[in-house]
Image: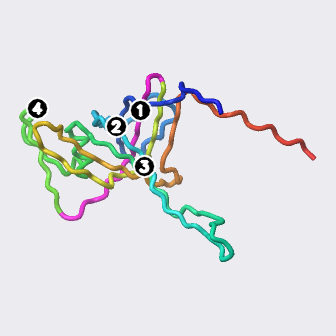
Amino acid sequence: MAVNAELARLGVTGALRTGPVGTTAPTDLGTWASGMVDLGYISEDGITESSDEDKQEFTPWQSSTPIRTEITRSTKTFQATLWESNFNTISLYYRVGLEDMTQTGTGADAVVSFAEKGKPKRDLRAFGIDVIDGTYHRRIFLPYAEVTERGEITYKSDTLIGYQVTITAYPGADEISVLRLFKEGWTLPAAPPEPPAG
């Protein structure tokens, strides 16, 4: 088997973005569509992608070995800890929009406030992820997703305040839950030749 160390990739840097549901999906690795906001610094743990699946195995009466396995549930999640405190990260973590917040004062003297009450409302959004390794680039787009888990916040003098979020991707109207683009030095294999007619 041939091996190629040049195709070993790192997630050296990147970004996590969010925008409204209905944001145009990327077709290349250029600029993001209008409305997609960069959430800023992410902790040194980067972004973790996870797949959680349930399956049903079918074992016939005459055998102890399954003859078929069917996936009954498949969930994609992406986890990151946001290290910037601003409107976008606070809004995402606490599920509050601009209409839920009030501000007194301006500039460095501004005080922003909001109240948490009752059952939290859903906060569906589009999300975009860039993973970069030098000239290599991987882009992930979640057209219809939401934060489904929020980690603890630690207030200490030797720890940055971070907002840990787990984002779950759902299928949209077109059934796409995750769209992926790769520019990593590999290409599609040539299609096999068509068998001769007759």
Q: Which residues are magenta?
A: 118-135
Side of 132 relative to 112 (left or right): right
Label 4 belongs to which residue?
A: 107
Label 1 belongs to which residue?
A: 11
Mark 4 residue crowding within 10 angstroms, few (<14) / some (14–19) / many (20+): few
Q: Are marks 1 and 2 in contact (CB under 8 Å)?
A: yes
The answer to which image quadrant residue 37 occupies is top left
Image coordinates for residue 104, horizontal then vertical, percent: 7, 42
Q: Secondary structure at mark 3?
A: strand
Label 2 belongs to which residue?
A: 46
Q: Residue at x 23, y 64 (%)?
A: 119
Q: Look at discs 3 and 4 and give the one toward the viewer.
A: 3
Label 3 belongs to which residue?
A: 50
Q: Look at discs 1 and 4 and give the one toward the viewer.
A: 1
Q: Residue at x 36, y 37 (%)?
A: 36
Q: Look at discs 2 and 4 and give the one toward the viewer.
A: 2
Residue 63 counted in the magenta span: no
Mark 3 residue crowding within 10 angstroms, few (<14) / some (14–19) / many (20+): few
Q: Secondary structure at mark 1?
A: loop
Image coordinates for residue 129, horizontal then vertical, percent: 40, 38
